[in-house]
Image (cartoon, rainbow, N blue to C red):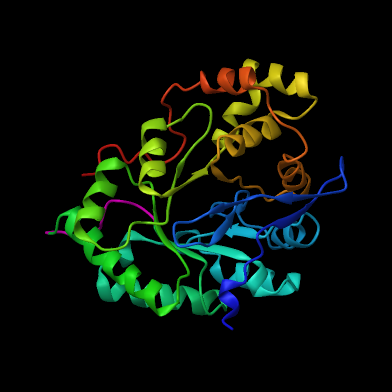
Amino acid sequence: MDDRNQLPSTAQVNMSDTSVLYCPTVPLSNGLQIPIFGLGTSHFGGYSHDAIVYALTECGVRHIDTAKRYGCEEKLGQALRESGIPRMDLWVTDKLWPGDYGYEAAKKACIDSCSQMGVKYFDLFLMHWPGSMRPGCSNREVRAETWRALEELYEEGVCRAIGVSNFLVHHLEQLKEDCGVVPHVNQVEYHPFQQPNKLKEYCQQEGIVFEGYSPLAKGQVLSNPTVLQIAEKYRRTPAQICIRWSIQNGVVTIPKSVKEKRIKENCQVFGFQLEELDMATLGSLHDERHVTWDPTDVE
C-alpha cells in the first residue's frame, strides 16, 4: 500500500502543563487530514536547524511549512531526517515562487524542490503569490497555465494536495473557471488585526481549507492591551491567546519561531478554550493592517 495515504489522523504534542494532547486535523476536500497546527520557516533569520529538530522530537510538531523562496529546503530536509520521524508521519508544505510559474517551469521547480529536500513527494504544494513575473502575459493566463502543471503533479502523486497562497476571491474564481481542480488550501495572512472573513467564508463555501500565517502579526499583537488583558485572565501568554483564537476559528495556523522556548510555548494551545465573549473581543481588533505582502492590487 502507498504509505502517502497513511498520515495519522492526529499529531502528538507534548505539553508541560498537561501530559500528552493531540493536535486536531482538518479534512481536505480530497480526504486527507492536515494538522491544524504547524511550524513555519522563512528566510531572513527565520530558519534554525536545531529549532526544527526540537519542534519535531520534543514538541510533537508534525506539520512543517516552507517555500523555495526561503532558501532552506536542503537544510530542512536534513532536519527532517535527523529527527528520525518517518516521512509518512509528517505533513510537509512547500511553495512555488512566481519566478517558476508556467507549465514546464513549475513542474521542474517542484521536482527540484523535492530533490533539494530529499523527499519523494510534498503533502501540500502551493502557488506562492497570485501575480506572475512573465512580461506580456496576464496574471490570470499564467496562473491557469501554472495550475495545470500542479494538477498534473497532483495526478502523478508528486503532490498529495495542491493549493495557493495569498489568493483573494477573484483570483480563486478565475482559477475555478479556468481549471479542473479546486485548490485544496488557500494560505493567507491571518491574525486579530487582519481578518479577511469574506475570503474565509468563500473558501469554506468552496471546500477550500483556510490556512493562516503570521498569527502573531510579526509580534505586533503581543503588546496589544486587549490581548494582554485576555492573556492575564487565562494565565497564558499573548502568543498562546492569539494562536488559540486562530485555531478555535477553525484556521490551520502556522506560527514561526527559531527559539525553542517560543516553539514550546506556541505548541501549548490545546489545553484550554477561549470563551465566546473573548473570541468576539479578539475578533473586534480587525483594522485591516497587513504585516506582510498585500495582494489587493494584483489583478
Residue 157, above or below 17:
below
230 in the magenta segment: no
Furthest residue in direction bottom, as rendered? 1
Give the camera-side residue of 25 and 116. Answer: 25
Quadrant in the rendering for residue 243 = top right
Q: Residue 159: give x, y in percent of width and height.
A: 45, 71
Give the camera-side residue of 270 and 58. Answer: 270
Q: Residue 233: give x, y in percent of width and height.
A: 76, 18
Q: Residue at x 65, y 27 (%)?
A: 222
Q: Residue at x 69, y 60 (%)?
A: 52
Horizontal placement of 296 versus 178: left or right? right
Q: Residue at x 57, y 59 (%)?
A: 33
Residue 2, above or below 180:
below
Q: Residue 225: give x, y in percent of width and height.
A: 64, 15
Q: Is residue 224 visible?
A: no
Horizontal placement of 279 versus 154: left or right? right
Q: Residue 34: give x, y in percent of width and height.
A: 57, 56
Quadrant in the rendering for residue 109 = bottom left
Name the quarter where the N terminus is drawn. bottom right
Residue 48, above or below 294:
below
Residue 81, above or below 238:
below
Name the quarter where the C terminus is drawn. top left
Give the camera-side residue of 165 and 67. Answer: 165
Horizontal placement of 262 versus 110: left or right? right
Give the camera-side residue of 294 and 64. Answer: 64
Q: Residue at x 37, y 61 (%)?
A: 97
Quadrant in the rendering for residue 176 = bottom left
Magenta residues (range): 128-136
Q: Is residue 262 visible?
A: yes
